[in-house]
Amino acid sequence: MNEEKLARTIQGEIEKATGEKAAVSIEDSVARLDGRFPSNQSAVDAGHISAGFEQVRGVVNEIDYPGRKPFALPQKVSDELTGKEFDVVIVGGGVIGLAVARELSRFNLSTAVIERHDDLGIDQTAHSNAMIHPAIATEHGTLKWEMNYKGNAMYDEVASQLDVDFKRIGTLVVAENPDEEQLLPVVVEIATKQKDPDPKELNRAELDRIEPGLAPNVRRGVLVWNTGIISVFELIIAYAENAMANGVQFFLNTSVTGVQTEEGNIKAVNTTRGTIKTHILVNAAGMYADRIAELAGDRFFTIHPRKGETIIFDKSYQPAQTVLTSFSMVAEKRSQYSKGGGIIPTIDGNLQFGPTAEEVCDREDVSTTSAGLEALFNRFAPVLERLKPRYEKPDKGKIITHFAGCRAATYKEDFIIEPSKKVKGLVYAAGIQSPGLASAPAIAERVKEIIIQEWHPAENTHFEPKRKRGKRFSELDHREREELIRTNTLYGHIVCRCENATEGEIVDALHRGIPAKSVDAIKRRTRAGMGRCQGGFCMPRVLEIISRERSIEKELVTKSGGESFILSGKTKQVKK
Amino acid sequence: MKADVTVIGSGPAGLTAALSAHESGAKEVLLLEREEELGGILKQCIHNGFGLEQFKEDYTGPEYAERLIKEIEKTNVRRLLNTMVIDLTPDRAITAVNPEKGIFQIESKSVVLAMGCRERARGSIGIPGTRPAGIYTAGVAQRFVNIDGYLPGKEIVILGSGDIGMIMARRLTLEGAQVKGVYEIMNYPGGLKRNIVQCLNDFDIPLHLSHTVTEIRGKERLEGVVVSRVDEKMQPIGGSEKFIACDTLLLSVGLIPENELSKGAGIELSPITKGPATTETMETAVAGVFSCGNVSTVFDLVDYVAQTGMTAGRNAARYATGDWKKERPSVEVIPGENVRVLFPQRYSFQDDLILFIRSAKPIESPLSIDISPLEMHIKKLYARPNEMIRVKVPRDKLKDITESIEVNITER
């Protein structure tokens, strides 16, 4: 089909589905949509319909709708980075950018990571469910699926080299009646086809060993054992620290404002803090990867933010040992583009319900909604109650926090990991949404392959794959604690009583590797403030330590960078 | 380390318990405090109203603490500061940590739990919206202002009409901040009448009953909240939403007894008080472990806290010195009609029974508190859940009880 004809066909399909007329044009297999639609959802539907055609490799969706957020480039603040030059600049300090940075540090390449926030991994990565998904739920044959099963298998090594807590707890699909039992072999078959290693059908005795206390009517289930849970905040810092130890440089609070090319080659990247020369630009910019592509003159996809909300329960409520899934949950998929969320334990011993999936207008939308909370609770609480009747009932009073984040989805709903077809030196790791965390090591390897094929860098013979994390009081036995306190008495001062985080850990986080600068950054690194009282006790103390260690006024300490100041000033000064 | 009586926490309950244990003959009393000074939350409560009953004085929190600390200093009660208890076993082995001693064990003949309570945070009440800076519990704001000398913000909305919230409304107004209103989801206030009058009415701060915050807005710092009216089921009423610009939201939405240690020691918590169930001696279900103050149930007056501390300290000393015998099994004390909170939960025939009662709803007409099977009827003109009622039942009246004691509130 020629492109004009295809455009007309797509236009017709969009009109059939949404009742709206979009202007559709196609060039080099990229569909561009314009027009004005009545809602975000209808505009998103138009994008998905267009992407459904195999000949369309990407969809640029410019359809306007009420509530659409205009996009503005950030203002330049300084020139301090001008004059710097690297072989590779990675845009985006999320788990993808960081995993790529570490992979590239195996070679003699000078590499920099630029990140718009004042800390790493705080958009998609920090808002993920910290789960290393099995490949069973991704669509067979997609790049997502390939990266998922390959990345999942790499995590034992990644976690052990980087000293990050990681546990394979498995996804357990249980049958609640004989009809469902009949269908369990299908689950095994699908998991096997998806390359999840060795899924097992279990009898009741075997079920009792891994998920005790199941309802009496549960007699059989399938364990897809490779599902993992990881300390995601530790992983972010670990990747960054290891990359840094191997020579990668990091520039935080730095946003891209332009990409300079010359005769189709990457030359430099303009940022809010000056121009950095480079010949390879890795686009791992998450929510804004399409904007980076546009700045480089290679626009072929649009990111549409899909929000997911999650609720977290107090540690005293731990009814599930696995990612516990009823057969009915597998059978009813919530949305075509999401795995539907689940009942997911965290490595720290909390239980999560989530995430939801909702197309939103604003890429920065991390707001929670009461509808989201109700939906999660009403969907998963009855399942838990049914499957684990001997445990305490799920109770909203045990929710300690509720958070949301956006997935950086493209209309093709697949990852883009490839060199640019137009600009030499531009490499994509874009459209990375769930299961991006599970896929990260494989994505990094793929990006590395693309770069070495083209540029043939020599190996870095000094590459050190191992990284050690700081001491954690809560993880040590009494003898080790004694020793630690003897060497540094600050480890004998517990600041966060819920998570047993000590002043020693907080001070360490303020000085090591990628130093924490804000209260939330301390929380992500040390868990201080992450427990049941959510910082009610320790936050003023953490603020004090930050102020002391960074030698800044307390008024300048932020919750999470930018203008998020915790205090408004000293007392007796309001009227001044 | 060994002790006769170890008291965990040095707020009003712990200070009183330690003193009382000492005065009751315990030789080695150990007082553990995780902060660098004694006094607990009293240190930041610079308002008055402390010790009216106990000392017949109108002290501020720090003055009240100082009086007790001075008493303690005259004794040989051993104080360990910067000391956090990280474990307590059912046989009363305590593991603690501090910067000087590192990790250490304490063997104590009896233990008094006086860890107080914590404030409910945003997560547990599920206010949707963004997560900017500027949302604090009232206690955190109190610490910022009164201990650290900083203001949490300039335009303030308070959710919940708990006492600390109302006290902070006044305090922040005096510091020049603008308190735009106090919003309470219930149709009656959460805190004491005197605080409504002295902290809100006197400063023209509006109290909106049957209202709650339904959304939080703002990216980096709080930009405002949406408040909504709620129906009888406490569900927001659609169409009643109102946006209020503010840079600070203070939460005064309830206190939760801090019982992580108690749970570790195998003490079951009462679903009503969220604290250990105790007898009138303040002994918990684990022998030799006593609990008092807000760790047992959230009290509204420091005098009540001190009273339970005194009882716990005295009995912990008795237990430690061997002067402890239970002649008969204890009986249950059961909350009946119109009673939401009732403390203590059991009676063991050793002391007068001092009951602390919260009604299940506001009753604004004459009523009677009936204690059965005793023919005891205490007449009151009103009962409000936010004002605890204290009733003393003398020991000699209770000696013939065999089954249980039930407390009902009857409207007359």
Image: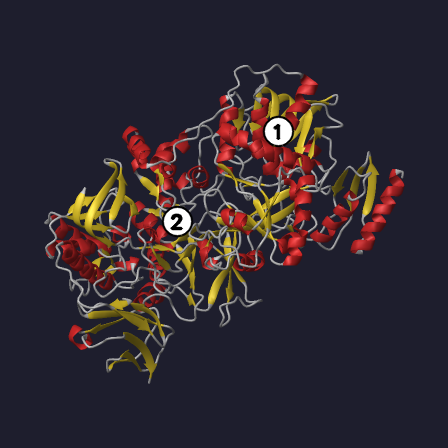
Q: Amino acid at mark 2?
A: Pro
Q: Look at the picture and state if A112 lies above or below A399.
A: above
Disc 2 to disc 1, C-alpha distance: 43 Å
Q: Residue at x 73, y 53 (%)?
A: A42
Q: Look at the picture and state if A227 lies above or below A213.
A: above
Image x and y of residue B390, in percent: 25, 71
Asked whether residue A33 appears in the rendered view, the answer is: yes
Residue underneath mark 1: A444
Residue underneath mark 2: B152
Image x and y of residue A255, in percent: 58, 33
Q: Look at the picture and state if A421 lies above or below A66.
A: above
Helix, strand, or loop for circle 1?
helix
Do callouts 2 and 1 point to residues on the same chain? no
Q: Using residue A502 as the reference point, say whether residue B395 is left or right of it.
A: left
Image x and y of residue B347, in percent: 24, 69
Q: Residue furthest bottom?
A: B412
Give the letter of the chain under mark 1.
A
Badge 2 crowding class, 10 Å Cα cut-off, few under 14, some 14 to 19, many 20 or more, is many
Q: Nearer the viewer, residue B245 or A88?
A: A88
Badge 1 crowding class, 10 Å Cα cut-off, few under 14, some 14 to 19, many 20 or more, is many
Helix, strand, or loop for circle 2?
loop
Q: Amino acid at mark 1?
A: Ala
Number of marks in picture = 2
